[in-house]
Image (cartoon, grey):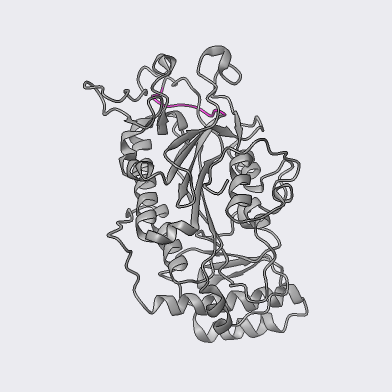
Amino acid sequence: MLTRRFFLRGSAMVMAGAGPVPFWLGRAAASAGSRRKILVAIFQRGAADGLNVVVPFAEKRYYTLRPTLGIPAPGAVNGPQPAIDLDGRFGLNPVLQPLKALWDRQMLAVVEATGSPDPTRSHFDAQDYMESGTPGMKRDGWLNRALPPAGPDASPLRAIAMSASLPRTLQGDCPAIAINDVQQFKAGAENAAIIERLYAASPDKPVAAAGKDAFAAMRMIEALNRTPYNPSGGAQYPQGGPLGRSLRQIAQLIKADAGVEAAFAEIGGWDHHQNEPQQMNNVLRQFGAALTAFATDMGDRMEDVVLVTMSEFGRTAQENGDNGTDHGHGDLMFVLGGPVRGGKVYGAWPGLEKEQLYEGRDLAVTTDFRQVLGELVSGHLGTPDVGQVFPGYRATAPLGLLKST
């Protein structure tokens, strides 16, 4: 039976959503050539330890709570490599050295003590809440709802996820597509033609329209793959991890004017209950190198792009007995792009004293993650009704993350 979500198994492509969106390839290529605003969302699955990603080195209690895991303050000469000073209070984990140049160029901002008001410490529930963007875990996702209805010339690649299946973030009424690997994509012309005819003949008009868009997307990607992609500006994407490959392919699609408006990628491996330093350094190295390479590769096109990162919750303020940390509450978010008012740490810092911690053990949340995303949705994508994107949420005064706000 055909459904509104369908799988094209031979192509490593998944497409979901769909209203009747007429489209043909030449028309899309012409419309996609215009510059558009693009929002890229990165999910750090597993609950990143924000206190060791951006170090609150001015807090003496940080070192009391983390006598082993604590990263030395900038200028320390003995012991592990020290944090990289950002503003006299917070410092980057030294493994994130590549990001310092983006901070200095005022393209990178940090929002501290962010997170969900939901108290859960379940990975599944917390990720579902953040990807749906609303209590009650709606079936669709906030990034899908942030997109305006597709016009007659909309590209089938306007909303893409670099993953094997479509994440909750991009599920919904607006057509969205998951591509596991652009470089290895092959449609299989004969089989694809048969399947395309089956979708076209479907009595379910939304399914037929979705099928039409999916096969148009196939043709666009196949056309792109005829020319090898070479990143610009000497950008070096990290090898061996998914985020570098995902951001490289997102850059390729954006620079090819394929009509991308929203993109999603993810990086796992943040659940460090034990042996945190070694494990975290490995994933941070990929994370920092991938973001830096993407910004370098995009060049002037970063003026049209905002990239935001998030994780389902943070880690306990105090290290555990296994050289790691456990599931916590408050965390942080990075915001990167040409429109970003960067070089600044945003958000109210709650402190790490016992009475300041959430439930006496975790960094408290002072900035709802929807506050950050809402500013980007309204100020960058230009979606006026943030209440429709985040039902039930009432925004507070803007943080001022974007130059236009």
x and y percentages locating residue 365 in the rendered image = 59, 28
Residue 326 painted magenta: yes
x and y percentages locating residue 332 in the rendered image = 50, 35
Foreground: 57 or 70? 57
x and y percentages locating residue 163 in the rendered image = 51, 58
In the rendered image, the quadrant that contains the N terminus is bottom right
Q: Residue at x 50, y 18 (%)?
A: 352
Farthest right residue in view: 203
Q: Residue at x 36, y 37 (%)?
A: 279
Q: Residue at x 66, y 32 (%)?
A: 117
x and y percentages locating residue 111 in the rendered image = 51, 36
Residue 228 in sight here: yes
Residue 199 horizontal side relative to residue 101, left or right: right
Farthest front residue in view: 404
Foreground: 12 or 392? 392
In the rendered image, the quadrant that contains the C terminus is top right
For residue 261, which quarter of the picture?
bottom right
With respect to residue 313, does 384 lie above or below?
Answer: below
Residue 324 painted magenta: yes
Residue 276 horizontal side relative to residue 396, left or right: left
Q: Main secondary structure of the magenta part?
A: loop
Which residues, given as a range, are shown in magenta? 322-329
Q: Residue at x 77, y 76 (%)?
A: 204
For residue 122, which quarter of the picture?
top right
Residue 1 horizontal side relative to residue 315, left or right: right
Count all numbered tags in the image, as a single digit: 0
Foreground: 362 or 76? 76
Residue 43 in sight here: no
